Amino acid sequence: SYKVVFNGDGYSDEWKEEAARRGLLNLPSTLDALRMMPSEKNKELFARLKVLNEREFEARYEIFLEQYYKTINIEANSVQQIGHTMILPAAVRYINELAAVVDRGKQLGISTKGTEQLLAQVSGLVDDLVERLDALEKQNLAHVDDEPLALAQHAREQVIPAMNAVRDVADRLERVLPDDYWPLPTYREMLFVK
């Protein structure tokens, strides 16, 4: 059997252990894989087979790094746009509705404790989302270097975690906003509803 065939979950800890046992590389991200590309044995192989000379090989490597960085940049811009133009407005509309219920409850002299708690929760999530969108924008606009590897590293180490932080808050908002307020397909709709 081949050392590379694994019929289990390639994202599990079991695979990491199995890959190490088989002496295989475990490269969890695109950048990890790209970093392996410019090894001397790879350059020599491509040159020996007359596929790419060293200069062409280096150029191809830099192009891959630039494509990686630019793709992450586009994704981050998309996350920012969705957050600012779709999710935040929906959450603010829901906050306005909850605040109106609380005000009306006070006028009528009835308890709105549950609504007040929900209002505080959604308001706090909106504050978190704004903060995380600002942090994402800052990381995405940061000009760390002109070197493709430095830009790619910044994208993986700073921009992707900032996008994930935005997603975390957006996921929490999705769980509390009513369906008629949520402007995007929900996880439930995408995974379970046909």
Image (spheres, grey):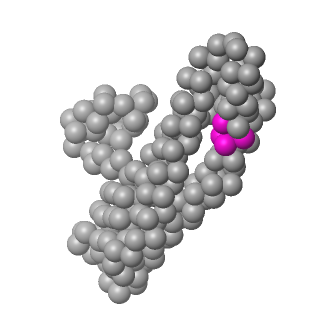
Q: Residue at x 46, y 70 (%)?
A: 141
Q: Nearer the viewer, residue 160 or 169?
A: 169
Q: Residue at x 63, y 21 (%)?
A: 115
The quarter of the image holding the C terminus is top right
The picture places residue 102, in percent across and down from the top left corner, at 68, 25
Q: Is residue 54 left or right of residue 23?
A: right
The picture places residue 36, in percent across and down from the top left corner, at 29, 62
The picture places residue 18, in percent across and down from the top left corner, at 27, 33
Magenta: main secondary structure: helix
Q: Quadrant of residue 100?
A: top right
Residue stretch in magenta: 91-95
Q: Quadrant of residue 12?
A: top left
Q: Is residue 188 left or right of residue 70?
A: right
The quarter of the image holding the N terminus is top left
Q: Is residue 33 visible?
A: no
> What number of labels is visible?
0
Residue at the extreme bottom: 55
Q: Residue at x 27, y 45 (%)?
A: 24
The picture places residue 11, in percent across and down from the top left corner, at 40, 35
As drawn, 56 above or below 191:
below
Q: Residue at x 47, y 51 (%)?
A: 131
